[in-house]
Amino acid sequence: MSRSAIPADRRGRQLLKQIPQFRICCSEDKPVTAARRFVQENNIVPPAVIAVQRNQQAAERFFWSTRGLFGARYAEEHYFLFPSLVAIVHQQANVGEQKVG
């Protein structure tokens, strides 16, 4: 299966796995508020994924980009809208060309 045949959400999921990942526990804040606070307090540099554990079963994931904080699912499906993720795609393409050449 060629790279172009990979569904966008799956390719986006692969890209998000390649950037820094952080996991935090959500206290009484809403998950998005906890993620924003964590990013600000820890000076997290984009791109990054912030997973906010709400309770034992549920966690919400967010994508921190130069454009702000987005749901990770949205970023997976629309990775081509984020310059930092597009840069990873181009890096992978360049590595593939170097191996062939």
Image (spheres, rainbow, N blue to C red):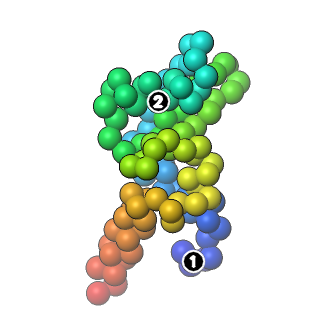
- Can you tell which quarter of the image residue 91 is in? bottom left
Residue 2 x %, y %: 56, 78
Give left or right: position of 27 versus 58. Answer: left
- Residue at 39% x, 49% y is 66
Q: Is the residue marked by circle 2 packed among few (<14), some (14-19), or many (20+) residues within 10 Å?
A: some
Q: Quadrant of the C terminus?
A: bottom left
Give left or right: position of 3 versus 39. Answer: right
Residue 60 x %, y %: 62, 33
Secondary structure state at the residue bearing disc 1: helix
Q: Pick the residue in front: 99 or 89.
A: 89
- Residue 10 visible here: no
Sequence-wise, the earlier of marks 2 and 1 is 1
Give left or right: position of 77 versus 38. Answer: right
Residue for badge 2:
36
Amino acid type, label 1: Ser
User: In the displayed image of the protein, which residue is found farthest to the bottom?
Assistant: 101
- Residue at 44% x, 24% y is 37
Give left or right: position of 82 versus 40. Answer: right
Contact between marks 2 and 1 (CB within 8 A): the answer is: no
Residue 39 x %, y %: 40, 31
For discs 2 and 1, the disc positioned in front in the rendered view: 2
Amino acid type, label 2: Arg
User: In the displayed image of the protein, which residue is found farthest to the front?
Assistant: 67
Total count of labels = 2
Look at the picture and state if 14 lies above or below 70. Answer: below
Q: Which mark is residue 4?
A: 1
Secondary structure state at the residue bearing disc 2: helix
